[in-house]
Every structure is written in C-alpha cells, then in structure tokens.
Image (cartoon, grey):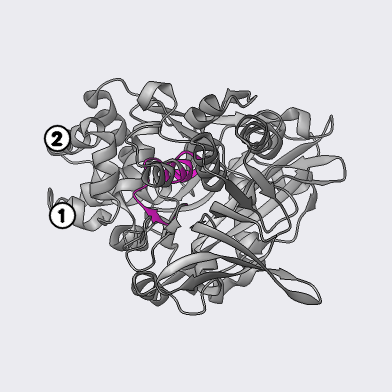
Amino acid sequence: MEKSYENIVVGAGFAGLVCSGYLARGGQKTLLLEKGPVIGGRAAAHSFNGYNVVMHLPLVMTTLNNGGGYGWANAAKDFGANIRYHTSREPRLYFKGSKKAFITIPKCLTTDAATNWMIEFLDAARPDLVKDGLYKELFPMVDEILTKDFKQMCEEWDEISVKEWVEARSSNPSIKYLFTSLWAGCVWTGDAEFTWERGSMGKGSVMFRIWIGGQGLMSVAIPDVHKGICEPIANAITNNFGCEIRTSQDVSEVLIENGKTTGVAIKREGKPDEIIKANRVILATTWLDYLNLFKTMPDSVAQTLRMPLNQKMGGVFLITGLNDSITLDGAFFMAYDPQTGSSIQGGCAQNIEQPWNVPAGKQLVWSYSIRTEKDFNRLGLDGIVAEMNENFEEIYPGFKKAIEFQTPPKGAVHPSHYEFSSLPKIRQKSPDVEGLYFCGEATWPMYGQITDGTSSTGANVAKMILGVNSL
C-alpha cells in the first residue's frame, strides 16, 4: 500500500527541523527528508586527527519574544529538546595595516551609546571622515534602527539596499562609509561596494541590534551545533510528536499535477525513483537546489532567481591547526580594509570557544573570506588563502610559524550572495502551485539572522499551514 503524508519537508537543517516539528506537534502527518547521511544540513561537524571541526558561525539568537527570538531557541523549548549552550565572547574588529589594537563590539543600552561607538569605529578605521556635526545627523538613524518594531523591520527593510535606506536619510559621505563598512560585516557580504548597492538593510539591522543594541547574543552549542542542537531537536520531534525523519534521501523532483503538489520523487540507485505522496511539499533546502527540483520551474521562482545571476561572489573557508607557541584570542573576529570599508576576513579560535573539540596542547582556527568573482579570478583560491594567512600574521604575530596543518581551502563563486542581498526573495507560500512552500535563508519574511532567522522561516511556514497566528 502506497504511503502518503500531509506534509513532506525537504532538508533537515534548522528551517526544516523547526517547520517539521511544529507541523507534527500540530497533529499533521509529516515526513522530513535529508539528502545527507545525518540531519542538520550544513551544521554537521567533521572529525579528523583528533579534532572535531565545527566550521560554523556561532549561533545567533535575538532576545526578543520572551528571550528566544523567533527562531530555534523558542522551538527547542516548545519541542522539549535537551539543549545546552554557552554565550560567545564579544566580537573583535581589526583594521588591516592600521597598527592599532582591535576594538570590541560592545552592547549599548542607549541610542546615545550606540551612536558614539559608531563614531569610535569610524575614528579607528578612517579618522579623516570624523567631522563636526556627525553625531547629530547619525543619532536619529541609529535610533530608528534600534527602536523600530522588530518584525516590521525585518519585513520592510529586507529587500531594501543599504544605499536606498541611507540616501533617503543622508548624503553625508562619512555616514555612507559607516553603514557600508559595518553592514559589510553585519550582512556577511564582505565587499563594501556590493554591500552598498545590494546588501540587505534589514538583515544588517538585525545583526546591528544583536551586536551593538544588546538585543541578542552569539552562542556556542555544547558539544557542537549538530550533536548539541540539531540532534536533540530531531529526537524531540520524533519521540514527542511522531515526526518521521529519513536521511540519505536524494529528492530528484517535486511532483506537480494540474497546478498542485502531489509529492516527491527520490533517487534510488539502479532502480526507478521512489514516489512518496503528500498534500504539501515544503522546500527547506538552499536556494540553489530549487534549480534542480522542478521539471518546470514555477513562474514566481524563476522570476525571482533571474536577477541574481548578474553578480557573483562567494566565501573561501579555511581551517588551520596550530601548536601552542602563540596565544590566540577566542572571540569571533572580523578584519577590515579601512580604505575600502570591506570586511575582508572573519573567524574564531575553536580551541577557546569549544576546547573539548580540540586535542590538549593544540589550537584550531576556522576562518572565512567573502570575495567577489573578480577576486576569485585575480587571485585564485591559493592567492586568497595567502592573503588570509598574512592577515592572521598581522593579528597574531608568529601565526605562520605555528601552523601544523591547513585543510585545502573550500570556496566557490555563487550568484550574488543572494540570501544576504536586497534582491527579492522567494515567497514562503507559492502563488503558482497549490501546496508548495519554501522556508530557509533565501525566503521572505525572515525574522532574524543566520540560524535564528532560518528557523523563523520554518516556524512561519508551519503557522501558515496550520492556520494559526502563534505557535
């Protein structure tokens, strides 16, 4: 007898886990499919040579909405998941070639304090741009960001560029530099020019409120994101609500008949695809997967994805093992090119944030660098890694001599860093196909950033399907 479900969720990352959990808790027969061998998507850890490498940014939680934001923390509590975490240190900012000590991103309790810190940032990066009258012009802009209704801000500003937002309020070049450079880090777009033209004002404002406005925190999972958060959530929604989860399931197609989803097809080696029927299909994959999951792309998705193909950029990721001949700062850091305002590198010493994952007497640093297609073509992966190591040497003298190994760099150029851009996002309920939904980091609306934000999209889709205003 053919098995069928009310919902099939494709992708068991944060968005898929949260969406599946709420649907199952709401009494709906739900199947969660994951292409990889374990749940968690990109949160999975990788073990080698005694290291448990967690190449993942510290988790982000907004402290609005009863302390759990709109994302994974509230969901974990609702599901009864066994989760522990600790708070990460305050991020550090370095300015390449400035020979100045790092500055710490503080938590500011007032608009006055946040405005003054932004001017301190400008003075550290580009003192030539600190002019009389800057505070008076900047204060109302900062106040608007810190006090606007959070959900409304995420909806209204997500598809507005930094340029559009700033130019509607100021023509001051000092303010342009401030927002371009800070948002290059806050939106994870790195390149200052791209951030100005296409960076999402909404997503950058979320991080600004978390880091500087004191409205959130960065945290580290115990023992890691995969085992400490994703697995407990998966266990909770399976045991408590009967959600069915299958791994190593490569979905080849979303099945659509007469404008309505009917289920999915799953690849089977040497055999015909397995067909699983469902009333609804929710895609919680990366946005690039949409290109391969439809025989005929839904019109709204095709139109939305058409624009990003004009601009390409991507991240280079590097993991470095070191001896203990130097002392690392464990805080999450970002390095800036003060002349351009670009955020050229970020990373964290895992041996300090999660010492239980690193052998005694050893140190491990993961790092990323967001680069444009022009940089990829000019330098290649090896050239970008050489620049990253030079930056590390400036931040931590003796770094290169302390290296015991570096993993081969991973990196690829993708269209436009789409998920963090101001380009139109995929709507979570398809206007073209009945029963088709999308959740994850490239969908709208998204109430938060990174892990918290993607989880919020899963919760939002579950609310739509269940027909409720709250969960």
Name the residue that disc number 1 marks.
167
Note whether 225 is above or below 265 in the view shown.
above
Indicate yes or no whether the magenta region holds residue 73: no
Which image quarter: residue 239? top right
* Residue plotted at (56% across, 28% down): 79
Sooner in the amino-acid sequence: mark 2 or mark 1: 2
In the image, residue 298 above or below residue 7: below
Q: Which residue is mark 2?
A: 140
The amino acid type of the residue labelled 2 equals Pro
Residue 455 is inside the magenta segment: yes
User: Image check: 289 left or right of 221?
Assistant: left
How far, Cα to Cα, is label 2 from label 1?
Answer: 14 Å
- For the residue marked with disc 1, what is the amino acid? Glu
The correct choice, above or below, for 231 with respect to 425 in the image is: above
Q: Which quarter of the rendered picture does the C terminus lie within?
A: top left
Taking the view exactly as shown, the residue that stands out farthest to the front is 1
Q: Nearer the viewer, residue 245 or 49?
A: 245
Q: Which mark is residue 30?
A: none
Magenta stretch bounds: 440-458
* Outermost residue, right side: 49
**How far from the left and from the top, in percent, is residue 366?**
66, 46
